[in-house]
Image (cartoon, rainbow, N blue to C red):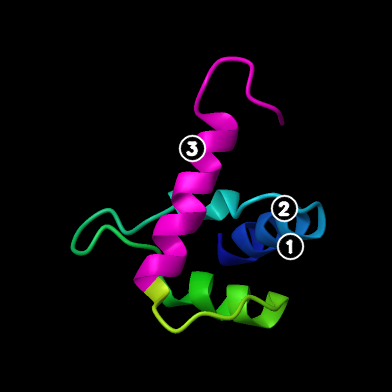
Amino acid sequence: MSHLLGAVFEDEYADGRPALTSIVTHKHGDKEPGGGFYDKARRLGYRFKEPYIFWAQQLQDVFKRYGKPGGTV
């Protein structure tokens, strides 16, 4: 699963879109993405000091883009 998520993240980044993979989170516990999400983001070139804030912003951007009827794909 992590390989598939990584490929999606790479494609979204290459096309200038927010990290669609930000919607994939732990089912139990903190309800945040796993460490692989942040590792991949850094390898792609994202720079951030606060992982939670980075994730929350990506999540907001995904919902802005895709969360309403007629959102662009």
Task: Please name the amino acid that badge 1 sits on.
Answer: Glu
Ranked by sequence position, the earlier of labels 2 and 3 is: 2
Task: Please name the amino acid that badge 2 sits on.
Answer: Glu
Name the image quarter holding the C terminus.
top right
Near-viewer residue (43 or 4)? 43
Q: Which percent across, then down, holds residue 56?
A: 40, 58
Secondary structure, mark 1, is helix
Q: Which residue is mark 1?
A: 10
Report crowding for label 2: few under 14, some 14 to 19, many 20 or more residues within 10 A (C-alpha). some
Q: CA distance from mark 2 to mark 3?
A: 14 Å
Q: Which residue is mark 3?
A: 63
What are the residue bounds of the magenta stretch?
52-73
Depth-wise, is mark 3 or mark 1 nearer the camera? 3
Residue placed at 63% from the left, 24% from the top?
Answer: 71
Q: CA distance from mark 1 to mark 2?
A: 6 Å
Report crowding for label 1: few under 14, some 14 to 19, many 20 or more residues within 10 A (C-alpha). some
Residue 46 as seen in the image, left or right of residue 67: right
Residue placed at 38% from the left, 67% from the top?
Answer: 53
Q: Which residue is mark 2?
A: 12
Main secondary structure type of the part rendered in magenta: helix
